[in-house]
Image (cartoon, rainbow, N blue to C red):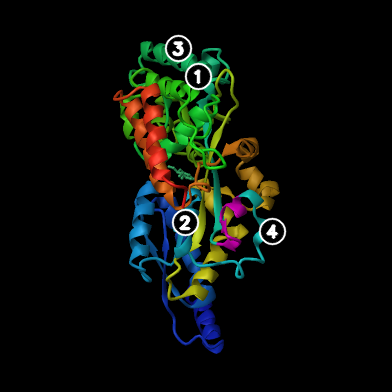
Amino acid sequence: MRRLIPSMVAATLALMSGQTHADTLRMQCAPSKEGRQYCNEIKQRFEAQTGHTLEFIDLPPASDEKLSLFQQLFAAKDASAIDLFQADTVWIGVLNKHLLDLTDSVSDIKQDFFPAAWQNNVVNGRVKAVPAYLDSGALYYRKDLLEKYDEQPPVTWADLTRIATRIQQEERAAGHKNFWGFVFQGKSYEGLTCNVLEWVASQNGGSFIDAQGNITINNPQAAQALNMAAGWIGKITPKGALGYMEEESRAVFQNGDALFMRNWPYAYVLAQDSSSAIRGKVGVMPLPKGAEGESVSALGGWQWAINGYTKNPQAAIALLKIVSDAESQKRALALMGQAPSRVALYDDPQVLAQAPYLADFKSIFAQSMPRPATQTKRQYAQVSRAIYNATFNVLRGDSDGVTAVADLQQRLERIKARGWR
Ligand code: GLC
């Protein structure tokens, strides 16, 4: 009953303002318990405010799988499958012409967001999406175990390898048979492109493709970075990590079965949940670097975007405004650990009390390096596929660093052909 009253009022207001019928809008919703709760809260607000109905759509978990699905929907100019969805940071150039132009409708909120995140979604001066949350790769570690073995958090990849090897050995000897040193995302998918960018760029191997669009991957530092990662498999990293995405690696770490984990900020809130085996034992810090390099975090994050073929642009924009406001971002942080894209929330006492670790992420965000998406435009999906396939081959032992970077250089040159389009 309490829920009905505001929606009836809103429906009446909508009728009075000339809107003659209520429509059904569809938005993407994460299938987890927390994801559903967040979406239901949005639904209540949206329906009460507009008198329309909101339905939820479930999407596949991997970024590149989601992208293929959207490419199919948009190729068919599908107007009804989805209205509002999250686009990965690296998709804006790929999907650009299928995204509703938001320039005029969101000019009033522009100044509330991190400028770099906002700028990522501007193509030829037109705003195509609004930052939903920020992501940056980080190293999670078990504070209690480093203390137990009198070790410091690792600064270089060599430190990480040595400490992981030692503690894994000692923990196993003490009876924890399935304990591992380091877990990351080793499956052949978009997440591996993020991991390999961090290994390569933090050891002075560049970022595959430079800002001018030149392909730079065929270099000895990059080859060596790939060999280093291959050397972890079966030693400090389970072979099963060749099938891990974010959630699989988090499951191992959160179960108490790994010393180090590479993951995004969301993993922190979940690791601290009352159901977590490692609650209170987790530290987070910038990823290690090479002896000669600097720590690098892949820049990730998701953006709210609207299907350019939607039949309900006005209602979809109203919905986008709700999910983009400070209240929704606070809920997304509390429930799903998503780091806000609104600047002011990083100084909000309520947010800081609830997520003090965000202060640690400030410096990690500052070290973020984008994947080569802007310069490769619509070809990014192919570029990333070539990168993660080549990396996967080395991790699996089917190629070695030197051969893989030479092959990858050629493959990227072929994709580029006469220039990035
Ligand atoms: C995270 C990042 C996204 C990235 C993905 C890879 O969701 O935010 O940018 O593509 O991980 O798995």
Residue 252, given in percent of the width and then of the height, sits at 38, 31
| Residue located 48% across and 13% down the image | 162
Q: Nearer the viewer, mark 3 or mark 1?
A: 1
> Does 181 sit left or right of 49 as displayed?
left
Q: Secondary structure at mark 4?
A: helix
Dot 2 corresponds to which residue?
Answer: 86
Q: Amino acid at mark 4?
A: Gln
Q: Nearer the viewer, mark 3 or mark 4?
A: 4
Residue 235, given in percent of the width and then of the height, sits at 36, 17
- Quarter of the view holding residue 398: top left
In whole angstroms, how far apart are the C-alphas of marks 2 and 4? 21 Å
Between 29 and 239, the one nearer to me in the picture: 239
Dot 3 corresponds to which residue?
Answer: 166
Residue range in magenta is 117-127
The yes-or-no answer for disc 3 within 8 Å of ligand 1 is no
Residue 123 among magenta residues? yes
